[in-house]
């Protein structure tokens, strides 16, 4: 349910504070960076002391560490580019799409850093298993590839960086967002399949969101091509 709560929070936050996010983006980036830093610091402390947070604070920390809040912002970014552009909600989301993408990337850093650190710390133990934990290794590798793809997308979402690029260069680079979305979905699915008991509800929610996005995006692209073809006649 962390995903559902995180997504509801992110949607409400984005729609209620659209103008504020647009005007004071650096303030929100600072908050996101502080949250990411605190999450990493706590996870390191937890590794050393085996201390675990309980209750609401524990659930909140997990939502950031597991990437639920980050995914919530990513879902907004995705659907902003797939929904009908004349809808009021689409216009609001499009107006802060770059800011939402940056917040998503910043908040994903704890998840990427700590899981990679965990993999490196236990690599000898992991490779000693017979048979090899293929799902887990695939989960890490796909996550790492997605993270590498994310870096230039993240950097070029900042206005000052984008301003130094031509529109053609920026659009060409942003096409890498699609394989990033796909790899993110695969990464999540493998993580769920790697659990002792597969959470079918989580799997269903993620599948509906990501597959639904790709269907809407393909419909939008198809309609756009039809309009261009009619306009050229």
Image (cartoon, helix red, strand yellow):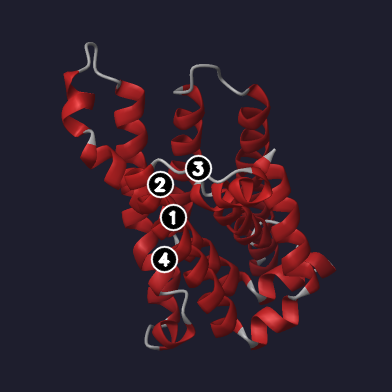
Front residue (pair 184, 162)? 184
Q: Secondary structure at mark 2?
A: helix
Q: Is residue 195 above or below residue 142?
A: above
In the rendered image, which residue does mark 2 sit on? 46
Res. 85 in view: no
Q: Nearer the viewer, residue 198 or 98?
A: 198
Q: Residues within 10 Å of mark 4 (few under 14, many from 20)?
A: many
Q: Quadrant of residue 174?
A: bottom left
Q: Residue beneath label 1, please?
A: 42
Residue 15 lies in quadrant: bottom right
Instruction: Point out the tag, 4 or 3, that comes first from the N-terminus.
Output: 3
Q: Tag 1, which secondary structure?
A: helix
Q: Residues under labels 4 and 3: Cα distance? A: 34 Å
Residue 171 place in picture, x, y as percent: 45, 70
Q: CA distance from mark 3 to mark 1?
A: 9 Å
Q: Residues within 10 Å of mark 2 (few under 14, many from 20)?
A: few
Q: Residue at x 66, y 42 (%)?
A: 2
Q: Which mark is residue 153?
A: 4
Disc 3 is placed on an element classified as loop
At x 31%, y 56%, the residue is: 148
Of the numbered discs 3 and 2, the one sitting upstream in the chain is 2
Q: Kindly identify the residue that appears in the image at 47 percent across and 71 percent down.
A: 33
Q: Are marks 3 and 2 in contact (CB under 8 Å)?
A: yes
Which residue is farthest right?
88
For label 3, the residue is 52
The residues bearing labels 2 and 4 have C-alpha atoms spaced at a distance of: 31 Å
Q: Quadrant of residue 42?
A: bottom left
């Amino acid at each position: 349910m962390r995903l559902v709560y995180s997504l509801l929070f992110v949607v409400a936050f984005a729609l209620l504070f659209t103008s504020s996010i647009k005007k004071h983006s650096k303030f929100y980036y600072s908050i996101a960076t502080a949250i990411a830093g605190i999450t990493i610091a706590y996870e390191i402390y937890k590794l050393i002391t085996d201390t675990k947070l309980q209750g609401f604070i524990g659930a909140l920390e997990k939502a950031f560490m597991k990437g639920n809040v980050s995914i919530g912002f990513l879902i907004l970014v995705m659907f902003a580019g797939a929904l009908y552009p004349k809808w009021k909600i689409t216009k609001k989301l499009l107006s802060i799409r770059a800011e939402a993408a940056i917040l998503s990337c910043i908040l994903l850093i704890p998840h990427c850093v700590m899981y990679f650190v965990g993999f490196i710390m236990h690599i000898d133990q992991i490779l000693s298993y017979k048979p090899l934990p293929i799902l887990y290794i695939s989960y890490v590798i796909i996550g790492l590839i997605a993270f590498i793809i994310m870096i230039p997308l993240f950097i070029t979402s900042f206005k000052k960086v984008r301003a130094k690029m031509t529109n053609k260069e920026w659009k060409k680079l942003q096409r890498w967002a699609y394989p990033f979305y796909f790899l993110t979905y695969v990464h999540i699915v493998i993580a769920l399949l790697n659990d002792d008991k597969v959470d079918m509800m989580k799997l269903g929610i993620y599948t509906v969101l990501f597959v639904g996005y790709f269907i809407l995006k393909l419909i939008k692209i198809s309609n756009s091509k039809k309009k261009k073809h009619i306009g050229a006649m």
